Image: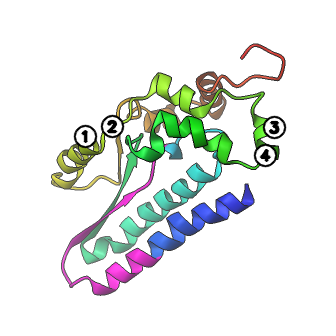
Amino acid sequence: MEKKLMENKSAFITGAGTGIGEALSRLPASPGWIVNVTSAAVYITIPPGASYPVSKNAFSVFSRHLRMELAPFGIDVTSLEPGGVATPMTSSEVMTEMGFLERSPKEIRELYRPYFIHPGEALSETFRFLTPDEFAEKVYSRVLCAKKFKPSYTIGPGVGFMPVLQHVLSQSMIEKLWKRQFRVGRPGREK
């Protein structure tokens, strides 16, 4: 898991920070916008992918702080938190063939299998992924056409309530909902 966490940190934090730093060095002395894409996974993990929401959450926090830091220069920063976009990577066939569990080391797969329903199955029962065109339209109409950027936008069917849950429910209640979603059980028990 540590290796995956470092890979995700490198991709989402170091890579983005380098790109944003380069962009800022080239910005004229006029207002501008930075739109970072994080994920609705900042609110809930998909087993056994804890490193993904951790790195996306770090990128989300980076965006919030960058927003405050760049405000005096007229540069606005916001985060997009898509619930899921239907791409080859997120197709149910691909998730089944090479999903989170299948990409994990063998010893991790063997530990996790008795406890969790397949993530692709759990998600497909609850969430509808947006097509890339639907996602682009929502980003354009809700974000790019906004008179003033909000700090973040959660975009997609079935995910708009997630930020509210984080503020209203206790952590133990969120964990109960998560266990129900992924049918978390104990080996030998009905999930």
Q: Secondary structure at mark 3?
A: helix
Give the numbered dot on residue 111: 3
- The reply to whether dot 1 and dot 3 touch (C-beta < 8 Å) is no
Tag 1: amino acid: Glu
Residue 39 sits inside the magenta stretch: yes
What residue sits right under mark 1 in the picture? 134
Of the residues tagged 1 and 4, which is closer to the observer? Answer: 4
Q: Earlier in the sequence, mark 1 or mark 3?
A: 3
Tag 4: amino acid: Lys
Q: Is residue 79 above or below residue 185?
A: below
Tag 2: amino acid: Leu
Alpha carbon separation for disc pair 2 and 3: 32 Å
Residue closer to the observer: 182 or 98: 98
Alpha carbon separation for disc pair 1 and 3: 38 Å
Q: Quadrant of residue 46?
A: top right
Query: x, y percentage for residue 69?
Result: 39, 72
What residue sits right under mark 4 in the picture? 106
Q: Do we see residue 1 in this rendering?
A: yes
Lateral position of residue 48 relative to residue 34, left or right: right
Please name the residue shown 24% across and 44% down the image. Answer: 133
Query: x, y percentage for residue 142?
Result: 22, 45
What residue sits right under mark 2 in the picture? 130
Q: Which residues are magenta?
A: 18-40
Please name the residue shown 41% across and 34% down the image. Answer: 159
Lateral position of residue 151 relative to residue 112, left or right: left
